[in-house]
Image (cartoon, grey):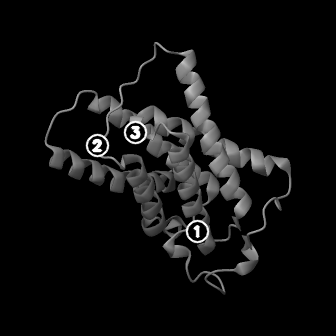
């Protein structure tokens, strides 16, 4: 339980500090800011769950193994994973990313932007996995990115089906979701030391 709270705080604290700094700089009241923050914390909870499933590495893993980066754990050849479920689960894991970003931020209601964010977020996870005993796999990168794009189209379909559900979008900055993803990855990579709970 404590390790879960600690891992969650490694994500939430840097993102909350960013929010405080931005809100102080703007020094203006925006309506629906409270609703916006609720959605942002749903988004951050999703990021935490993604890290929990993916097994992101941390700086504290460096030096635990005979080599820092183990080439035998890197797969750059596509479609080499065993079993269809590997592909399906990687797609499902990134569906919420593609759904939540356009739901929360109007500026990101574009499939190309979602593709780029999905690719970047998945790539950052795969790069962090170089430092622990998880395989860094091109299949994961491709399926995660595909999942984000499919999530975007699910959001688009949902928006058409439920036209009277209108979520007013606000934004603290132009790059807000990208900043949250970056801070979450850095927070987990630099701050989370699982050995504390051994």
Sequence-earlier tag: 1 or 2: 1
Q: Within the image, what quadrant is residue 38 found in?
A: top left
**Extreme-bottom residue of the structure:** 66
* SS category of the residue bearing label 2: loop
Q: Quadrant of the C terminus?
A: bottom right
Residue at figure coordinates x 29%, y 31% from the top left: 34
Q: Are marks 2 and 3 in contact (CB under 8 Å)?
A: no
* SS category of the residue bearing label 3: helix
Q: Residue 55, image x and y in percent? A: 61, 60
Question: So how many labels did they put on this image?
Answer: 3
Instruction: Answer with left or right where residue 111 lies relative to residue 38.
Output: right
Label 2 belongs to which residue? 172
Sequence-earlier tag: 1 or 3: 3
Bin the neighbour count of mark 3 within 10 Å (Cα to Cα): few under 14, some 14-19, many 20 and up: some
Q: Within the image, what quadrant is residue 166 found in?
A: top left
Sequence-earlier tag: 2 or 3: 3
Q: How far apart are the two marked residues, 1 and 2, measured between alpha carbons?
A: 28 Å
Residue at figure coordinates x 56%, y 28% from the top left: 156
- Specify the label residue 107 is tagged with: 3
Q: Residue 135, image x and y in percent? A: 71, 67
Label 1 belongs to which residue? 127
- Residue 84, compared with residue 135, is above or below; it is above
């Amino acid at each position: 339980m404590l390790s879960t709270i600690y891992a969650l705080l490694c994500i939430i604290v840097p993102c909350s500090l960013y929010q405080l700094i931005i809100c102080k700089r703007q020094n203006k009241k925006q309506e629906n800011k409270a609703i916006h923050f609720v959605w942002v914390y749903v988004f951050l909870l999703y990021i935490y769950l993604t890290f929990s499933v993916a097994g992101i590495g941390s700086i504290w893993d460096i030096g635990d193994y005979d080599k820092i980066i183990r080439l035998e754990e890197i797969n750059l050849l596509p479609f080499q994973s065993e079993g269809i479920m590997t592909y399906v689960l990687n797609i499902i894991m990134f569906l919420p990313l593609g759904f939540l970003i356009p739901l929360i931020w109007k500026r990101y209601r574009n499939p190309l932007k979602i593709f780029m964010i999905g690719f970047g977020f998945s790539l950052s996870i795969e790069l962090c996995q170089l430092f622990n005993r998880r395989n860094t796999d091109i299949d994961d990168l491709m399926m995660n990115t595909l999942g984000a794009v499919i999530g975007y189209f699910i959001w688009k379909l949902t928006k058409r089906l439920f036209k009277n559900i209108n979520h007013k979008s606000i934004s603290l900055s132009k790059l807000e979701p990208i900043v949250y993803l970056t801070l979450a990855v850095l927070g987990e990579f630099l701050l989370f030391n699982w050995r504390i709970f051994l």
